[in-house]
Structures are given as C-alpha cells and as structure tokens.
Image (cartoon, helix red, strand yellow):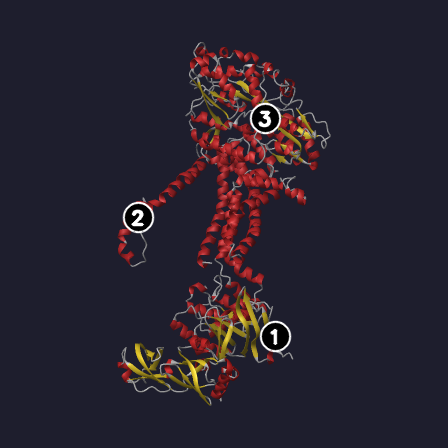
Amino acid sequence: MTLAPGDVAFDVEFRGITKRFGPLVAVNRVDLQVNKGEFLSLLGPSGCGKTTSLRMIAGFEQPDEGELLIGGTDAVGVPPYRRNVNTVFQSYALFPHMSVIDNVAYGLKQRGTGKAERIRLSGEALELVQLTGRQDHRPSMLSGGQQQRVALARALVMHPQVLLLDEPLGALDLKLRKEMQVELKRIQEQVGITFIYVTHDQEEALSMSDRVAVMSNGVIEQLDEPRVIYDNPRTSFVAEFIGDMNFLSGVVTEKVGGQFIVDAGGGVVIRGHGAASRGSSVRVGIRPERMTALPGSPEQQANSAKATVLSKMYLGDQIQISVSLANGQRIIVREQRASANPVLDVVYSGDEVLVSWDDKAPLLLEQTVPLQSSAEAEQYTPSEEAAVHASTEES
Amino acid sequence: MTLLSEPKQEKAVGVKRRGRSFKPRYPTWLALPALVYEVIFFLGALGILVAFSFATQTGFSQITYGFSLDQYKAVFDPLYLSIFFRTLMMAAIGTILTVMVGYPVAYWMARYLSTYKLLAVLLIMVPFWTSFLIRTYALKIILDSQGFLAKTFGLDIMYTPIAVGIGLVYNYLPLFVLPVFGSLERMDWTLIEAATDLTARPLRAFWDITFRLTLPGIVTGALLVFIPMTGEYVIPAILSGGKYEFVGNLIGDTFNTAQNPPFGSALAIMLMVALSVFVVIYIAVATKEERFGA
Amino acid sequence: MNSQSPDDLNILAPIEMKPKMDYLHREVQRAAGSAMSRRKALSLGGLALFAAACGSTSTSTTPTGGASSGPASASPSSSLAGKPVENMLEIFNWSEYDDPSTYKLFAELGPVAAAGTKTHETYYSSNDELLAKLNSGGSTYDLIVPSQNAVAQLIQEGKLMALDQTLLPNLKYLEPSFLKSSYDPTGEFSVIKDFGVTMFYFNNKIVTDDLKTMHDFYMALPKYVSKGRTNLLDGAEELVPLGLMALGLDPNTTSQADFDQVRTFLLSIRSGVTTISADYIQDAIAGKIILGQGWNGDVRRIVQGRKAQGDITAVLPTGSSEVWSDNWCIPLTAPHPVAAHTWINWLLTPTTAVTEMEYHSYPIPIPDALSQLPADMKNDQLFNVPTSYTDGYHYILNVSPQVVQQRTKIYTEFKAS
C-alpha cells in the first residue's frame, strides 16, 4: 500500500527510530509524524535528542533502528545531497569566501540552474527574508540577524519539502530574537513549507509552533498544540519544563465520579478532576497564575490553604509571592497586577495569607497505585484525557 | 632611533589611549636581540654576498671589490640557466608531490582524529628529531639497489630523479603538513554539511569549500617547502649519485672547488631573486587568509 | 672541492666550528656505515675559502705574481745551522695522522729532550681550512701538512720557509724521484709525508675486457653501465684532469683546445656513468659497483673486502694517472724552525716511517722502511705502488683561478647533462 509522494499526509515520519552514539542512546524508539505545511517544534533541554532527530531528517546522521520516511519514501541511507530538505544551521554555516548572493545561489548552482535564473531566484529569496542591497557583501560584513536571513534565504531558495531549523535564533539577542520569531512565522505562512524547528526555548516553541514535541532523554514526552502542552502537561517533565509549576504530593482520600480529593498534609486538601484511584499517592501540579492569595487567615478548606509569605517579587506586569504552606511546602503564586487585590501590594514577608484555586487548576501528573488496586489505576491514561480535552476545545 | 623615541610618543597620546582597552607598556628592548641577530647574521651576511657578487676574482683567496656585472652576466650562460630551470622544476615537482601526499594526511588528522590528534602531530614531527643528514642517509639505505625497496618490490630507483623526488618529499613533508593541518583545524565542518545539504556531492563540497578555505594554508605550506627545496643541496648530492644537481650544489662547487666567491655569490643572489617572486605570492595569499579568517 | 660531501653544508658556519663539524661528519659517516678515508677527508671542506676571502682585502699584501714568478721568501737556512732546538713545537695537522709513539719518541731524542721541547698539535680537515688559517695570520705554526695543491699555492704566495737541508740528513733515505716534484720543482720547500694514486677497479665476473689504461676505463663505462653501477670520483679537480690524462694530455693544462677536447670526451662517456661520488668504498665492498675509479688505499680495502668473492680486479693504470701527496712544510713565520726541522728529520728515519705506515696505511717513499714492512703490505702493489707506475703519474694542481674555473664549468656541465 505505497502511496504516491504527493498523496501522503506526512512530510516526515519516524517509525520507532533509535540512534545511538556509543553507549549513549540519543534517540530512543521515537515515533513522529509531521503534517504537511505545519510548523513543528522539537523542544527540550540539551542532550534530549532533538538535534539528533533533526540531523537524521537532514541526512547527516543515519538511524540505527526504525524507519524514516520523507514525503512517504524511505530515507534511510539516502545522503543529504539527495534529500529534498534543507537546513538552517545554528551557526548559520555561511560560506565565508562567497558573497551573499553566491551563498544563496550555491544550492541552485549544484542543481544546474542557469546563471540568470539563479540570480533571479536568489534575489527573490533575499527579498522574502527582507535582506536586499547586500548581495555582494561577504557574510563577515553582516550583522548576526542579517546572516540569519541569508542562511534562511539560502535554504528557502531550494524550495525544500521540509525546512529544518536548528536553534536558528540562539545566537541573537533577545530583541532581535523576538523580531525574528515573528518574521519566521510570517515567512512560513507565506511559503507554506513544513518547518521543523529545534529549540530549547519553550517560549519560542510555544509562540511560533503549530505543534510542539517536548523531548527528554531521547523520547518524545508529549506532542501537542502549544496550549495543550501548557494547560495539560502529560508528565511531570513537561509540566516542569514548560512554564512554572507548583507541585503538591499527597494521597487520594476520596474519588467521586471524575473528581478526586487529595490530602497533601498539614490540612492542605486538593480537589480536582481526573481518574485517580483511592489510596494511591499522587503528584499534582498547579500553575502559579491559577492561584490567588488573599490576606488574612480564614479557615482552610479544599483548594484553599493557609500560607506564610516568604518573599515578594515584582515582574513588571505581574506580581509573584513565594509562600510556605501549612504542610511546609513552598509554592509560588502569581497574579496579573491589573487584577491583583490592591491589598496584595501591602503584603509583606511573614504575613499570613490564604492561597486558593479552583478545582480545574490541579493537574494530576503522577500516580503511584498501591499493589492491590493496580488494575483500576492502569486505566488511567492522561493522553486520552488530553486528546479528548484538545478535541473538545477545537470543536 | 625609533625605538628610543617611542616612549615619548606614548606620553603624547596618553590621553587618547585612556579610552581604549588596557594594553600594558611593552619593554621594547626585548625585541632588540632578535633585531641585532637579524642585522648581523642576515643583513650582514647578505651584504657580504652582494659585495662579493660585484667583485672580481684576482687569485686564489683574493678578490678585488668593485662594481662589476660580469658575474651576473655569467649566470645567464645556458648551462647555468638550465640548472636553475632544473632546480625550480624539481622543487616544483617535489612540492606538488608533497601537497598530494601531505594534504590527505593533514585532512585525516584534522577531521577524523580526536583522541590521537596530538599524537599524530607528534609523529609527523618525529623525522625532525633526527639530523637531516642522517635521515637522508637512512633513505639511501632504503632506496639502495640492494636495499629494502629493491629487494622487496624490485624498485631500483637510487641515483635517479625519482629518488631525489622521494627524498624531497620525505624531508619536507612535516613542513607542509603542519600549516595545512592548522588551516584544516580551523575549518568549520558544518560548512561541509551546509554544502551537502544544498545538494553538493562530497567531492564538489570539498573543492568548493574545504579546499578553497584551506588554500591559504596550502599555499603557505607549499612555499614553506618549495623555497628550501630550491636551495636543496644534500638530497640531490646523496640521492642522485652526484648527478641531477641543484643550484645549491653549483653554488657550493663555485665557492669551494672553483674558489670563486664572486660568481658563487651572484648565483646565490639570482636564486634569491627568483624565489622572491614566490614570496610575493605568499604574502598576497597570506593577507587574503586574514581577511576570511578561515 | 667535493661538492658531494654533505660536510660542505656548514659553508656559513664560523671557522671555529669546523673541527666539530668534521667530527660530526665522521660520526655520520660511521653511522652510515662507511669510515672516512684520508683521501676523502682531503676532499672535504669549503668553508675555509669563504672565510679566507672575508679575511683578505683587495689590496693584497702578498705577492700575487703569475705561475712563472719565483718564490719570494729569502732562504734562512744559513742562519739556522748550529742553532739549538727550541723548547716548543707547534704542529698544524690533519687529525690522527701520526702514530702516538712518534710524538713520544721524538720527545726522547737527545737534543729535543735537552731542550725540553713541548709538542702541541692542532688540527684541520681541509687544505682550504689550512690556507684560511694561514691567511688570517692570527696563528703561528712551526709545521703544517699541506697537500700538493696547497704547497704550490703557498710557495707561490711566498709563505713557506726554504728548508735547511743540513738539518735534514735523513733526506738521503727518501726515494730520489720524490725529492723534487712538479709542485715544488726545487724541492726546497717541502718534504713528502706520504702519497697515493688514483686507479680503477671492476667486477671481473661482469666486465670481461682487459682494461689497462684510464682511457680503457672510460671507454668501458658506456659498454657496461647497463650491467650495474659505475662510479667516477667527484670534484672538478678529479674529473677533468683525469679525463685529460686519459687522453694523454697534461692534467694541468691551460690550453683551451685541451679543455674543449676533454669536454667532448667526457660528455661522450657521460651516459656510462651511474654515480659521481667519493663515497664508494662501502658500496663497492657490498658488490654494488661494477666499474669505478678510486684511490689506491680505498681500492685496497675493496679488494680485501671482496676477497671471499674474488670478483674485484684492481688496475694501476699504465700510462698516465694521478698521484697525490701530503707534505711537511714550515711556514715562513715559524717561531721554532729548528725544532720543526728536527721533527721532519725524525719522520724520515726508516724505523719511524715503518711505525707511521703501519699506523696510517699510506706509503712513505723510503725504500729502507718499505722493505721492513710485513709482507702483506710491502708486496701489495696497491699499498707499495711501484715507481714504475708513479713515474708516469702526475700531480694535479690548481694552476690558476682561470684553470679551476674551466675545470669547474666542464664538471658542472658533465653533471648537468
């Protein structure tokens, strides 16, 4: 049941791909499907396997196991120069001895495109990345951002099926990086080419991508839309890696329908939604901005805990306090300053506050089921829930 | 004189300097030994050669100084020109062979070795640990008609230009490999990935990128071997069996056998003139290298 | 001289470095498996002239008359007779060239012992070096050992003392034909120390012709070169005069016609030459050379070295060939001339000559001494070269700078073609 290249749904597909470097398993039986025309980010800390995955798509590395399909055809063993993918390197890798236009036209020249056509197409590519009038400059005479644009133009002019970007903005300063993020997104939308973007910057990944694959230790922890990744991290790793997260641990004391009650100790009780089984130890995550803090110390109840303020920090548009709960755990509470209770401004270290959250805020991240009730707990599959959640949001 | 006036200058521009990065005052006299050395042993010796070349031989151990161009005119005898030509040809062939033998090993060392890279550099240098003369005699033993090569492979190439070529390559290889290795070490190999990513075949990528970027290193290394090769004396003497002479041997004969320093000096200076052409090329390429920084 | 010698490398080293360089050279030779022959040492050098040229000025202080002009030095012989032996003797010599016992026994001679003469010796390794030292004028020596070339040049420059024959009674032991020579026609300025000849040898299993003369040798080169390695002695002062002698011409000729003739002759046999080298002993002993020129001391070693194979035929050429010599001379400025004369006379004593010959293996032309040598030496024509040969041989001299130039150019062309 081979499909014609044009018919396949996926531009790139990993089927159980493993890549080892000596004893190190860089990529561990990864399955991945990259849709046509999407902007997909591979996000993770260094050494998570994201760059290796990218290099396998480019052809610089060959997988040890599994199948790699590009445009529906087997790409294992195909050298880089026979793949219709192009890469924007982290260091740009511009040829220092060639002018900007020669750099951009290099690939076309290899393809045998005529000189006039080469110059025309290269000029267009440079226009697309908004770098004109510097065609005859050497790369060393350009700023980092301009070099970045040349690298982009050099890859785009090839009209690849997939464009691979390996932390392309890593070397730029913050302001320029933000500009280029917008720029990249614009270009991707304009040319409609599939972008696979490797980054360790979660903000960058979340802001630009159609989907994000969070990687850790050679596996994809979660592959979802940015919002789902943020709102419903499937694992502790994702929860911790993406944004800030308060973790609370406890034992499930009650389970009614889709609701559970967790006793986190010290009178801290969490009520949330999820398939937890009674008696199991769980780890629950709550985003700092899903919490509110009120001065004074009314009675504790579920999703409302007494706390002592440890420190306070102004983050421009937000205010953040670090508090110690009655069970001794430290958590962070963050609020928009516009909506903050003005009284919070006069809260100081040592003050008593009541921290509360609604029952949609707690995310059930880990569950250790006691042996006797393991059968029940195994039915819990966060991905299903996340998938359902995502689909309902979309519809 | 300039050395002495420099500290004064520094005071005068002291205010301006404050704005720049810290640059400690250098005790300029530290450069003096080298300068003195150069002046006495290079310029001094060169001066003597020049004076000799315009002199006339009046007897054994006796010359009359003056300004005679006779020695230079004598250099243009077809016999001597043919020896100049032969020398430059052999040095050029030796250089090309050295490049062909040396570049691949430098490439391999720079790109494919990591743990043993330093060891490889050291091993390349090993021949330099022994005297040039001993090395060449050792080569003679190997190339000899009853030596290893002849007995094992039936290659009796001793006393042929091939033997001289082998001797040149063998003795000068490290001088070529090291600068080229340095050049390849600075090479950013992602450029090669970029080129293959842009559909260049590996060989194409090598020529367009690696070769092009290490060309200054190749030229440096090639000149570093070419120049001394043209002045080579021992290798042709030992490995050609006294035939296939280089200019160096001719200069030696002229000074020693013919006891004619004026003509010997004129030959030496003409060789220097011929070589300076190549040095100019070198300087041109070396400055270009700085511009790329590759 | 010998451009093939790597020793010439040190052309720009200071003169003081020369002994060290020579030592190094010998070590290298040893390492490479060939000991240096005395004759080969003769052909080394080169630096000296360079230094000499630096030392001399354009306004020469020494007489530079042509070859015809006579020696300029006044004979001091009359003033020496009857004078006592001085307490010092300064010898400037080739290294390891005299038996240690010769020095010891000299010191025990009656008049020498009475004067308490101390002998001090310094060394050089080329005639050029010797000439340079004498030209620089810094050192004073009582005795020097120049080869025939240098003797002629020093006589011409008036730097040698005419010897007092009355102080040299032992001259009577010397073979008369060696009393006077082409380089010292009056025999006044030098006394021969030892000598040698240039000859040739071939592998008789391969070269089957009956080669007798130098001309035969040259003509055999192109014929046999395809069968193995052939070797000529290197250096313009060997190649060209030997070629001239093969043609029956004067090796010290100044005639352009002769030079043209020898040039044509040498170029005609050029294709028959594999190597041009003084470094041939070991290779010949290893059986690598099938036909080559050599000095008799070396050829003797080659014959001995190939005794087991018995395939080397050594030929003292009939007709003309080269004879060379080293000589005792006293510089004009010698501070201790009586002691120097006493030394020369002592060396002419047959018993001393026997010890010396056994030490350095070069013949001294003293019949009484030669007859006392062991049979394997005295009966060996390669050592005790019969005068029937040497009478027809010639010394090769550096006649004039112009002649040396001519020779060098032919030599260069020969090598370059």
| Residue C396: assigned label | none
Query: Camera-side residue: B155 or A100?
Result: B155
Disc 2 to disc 3, how far (Cα)?
65 Å
From the image, state whether disc 2 or disc 3 is nearer to you: 2
The quarter in which the N terminus of chain A is drawn is bottom right
Q: CA distance from mark 1 to mark 2?
A: 72 Å
Label 2 packing within 10 angstroms: few (<14), some (14-19), many (20+): few
Residue depth check, mark 1 versus mark 2: number of the one nearer the observer: 1
Q: Amino acid at mark 3?
A: Ser
Q: Chain of mark 2?
A: B
- Residue C163 at x, y = what percent? 49, 15
Q: Are marks 2 and 3 on the same chain?
A: no
SS category of the residue bearing label 2: helix
Q: Pointer 1: what residue?
A: A73
Q: Which residue is mark 2?
A: B6
Q: Position of residue C85 (x, y in %)?
A: 44, 13
Nearest the viewer among A123 and B159 is: B159
Q: Residue A339 versus residue C396: which sits nearer the camera?
A: A339
Amino acid type for the residue under numbered disc 2: Glu
